[in-house]
Amino acid sequence: MENKLFTPYKLGPITLRNRIIRSAAFENMCTGNKPSQQLQDYHVSVARGGVGMTTVAYCAVDLSGVSFDGQLYIHDEILPDLKRLTDAIHAEGAKASIQLGHCGNMTHFYTCHCMPVSASSGINLYSPTIHRRLKVSEIKNLVKKFGEAVDFCRKAGFDCVEIHAGHAYLISQFISPRTNHRHDEYGGSFKNRVRFMNEVLDEVMLHAGKDMAVVVKTNMWDDCRGGSDIAEGIRVAKEIAKHKVHGIVLSGGTVSRSPMTILGGAMPVNTLAHYMPMATFWWLKAALHIPGVQPIMLPTQPFRELYFMDKAKLFQKEIHDVPLIYVGGVQSGDNCQQIMDEGFELFQIAHVLIKDPDFVKHIKENPHYHAGCGRSNYCVGRMYTLDMKCHHCVLRDGEQIPKSLIREIDRLEADAKKSVENSK
């Protein structure tokens, strides 16, 4: 593994000490939309654990793009805290990245303080919320905000920005025919549906200049009825490549229709319902206990290691002028080696670093090290209302987990283990 995995990599204008990036998995550690000491401590622990770069999750370019109080959005008040965070990451030898995006219709009035917006007007039953169609003037203003956000992140000490163009957030809402029903220059044809994304990337690359790296997270496919398929996902990735970005992160699925495609494995329904506050999510808590509803709302995916690899290799055959960054289902040093053997220069990880921030150190010492992440997705079930944390860490820190949830964790981990064995 020493011959490549732990060698430096030049990502545009910056050099990473190795090929491993902490992906932008939502931490929910930004109370009141401000960075916390907990957020800094977590990313510093990951940097100390050996990653080449760590990515602070979802930062909206505008308050209208925030979907949770635990997320960041660009405003001057958070600049000093972000600068302390990046300084601390750099002190551990890692680079610092931040994911920039806009959630579009995946929010509520009481969170974003306005009527949620999207490519088209409608109702998002999964939020649930009524949302309105963005005016062209508002689209142009958001494009500018993406560029201004890059300048802000430079001041905050970040080395790289990751533009979120997937998972059914705003850019993806324009791209997908499922959510874009416009009849102007931003809707209809493929060229029109990717126009907003292209304008954002033009602006981002202009502001990135020669000192900021830029990567883009995109969907290989939406995995939902009416959404973009693999063929269109490849067309989108080729559009992204035209902007000479420094990397493309290959993901898939949508947060509202196929969340476990993104995350891998089963949704821990009882955990999700337990941690959701009744006042906010009463409707979902109730719906999850109606027989037959859960498989429709939150369909399960049988877990397998490197679950995006087959589709990522299809993109690898079509795109050659921009580095493709693999993400999805990394559990062990053997998985890391396989990614390198498949020809990917970089990859992102999250689940294993939630349980074990020292994962990179461990695989450097033992190439066959396995993190022991059972993929119960307990961390996913609690991260939308509490901080992101593995159940092993919760118990270690003295926090109690109800026995009913422990039983669910054990069952889902057994299912995931069986699924992995069957996939080999």
Image (cartoon, helix red, strand yellow):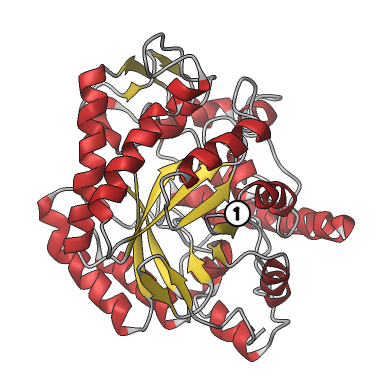
- Residue 72 shows in the view: no
Q: Quadrant of residue 421?
A: bottom right
Q: Nearer the viewer, residue 116 or 51?
A: 51
Residue 29 location (% of width, % of height): 33, 58
Name which residue lies at 32% across and 28% down. 108
Above or below residue 370? Residue 118 is above
List the residue tagged with mark 1: 320
Q: Nearer the viewer, residue 403 or 234?
A: 234
Quadrant of the image containing the N terminus: bottom right
Q: Nearer the viewer, residue 27 or 411?
A: 27
Say what secondary structure mark 1 lies in.
loop
Tell which residue pokes out farthest to the top in this image: 183
Residue 204 location (% of width, % of height): 29, 47
Residue 150 location (% of width, % of height): 24, 52
Above or below residue 327? Residue 163 is above
How dense is the environment of label 1, judged by Cα within 10 Å: few (below 14), some, or many (20 and up)?
A: few
Quadrant of the image containing the C terminus: bottom right
Name which residue lies at 44% across and 58% down. 246
Name which residue lies at 58% across and 30% down. 257
Tell which residue pokes out farthest to the bottom in this image: 365
Say what amino acid the circle numbered 1 marks.
His
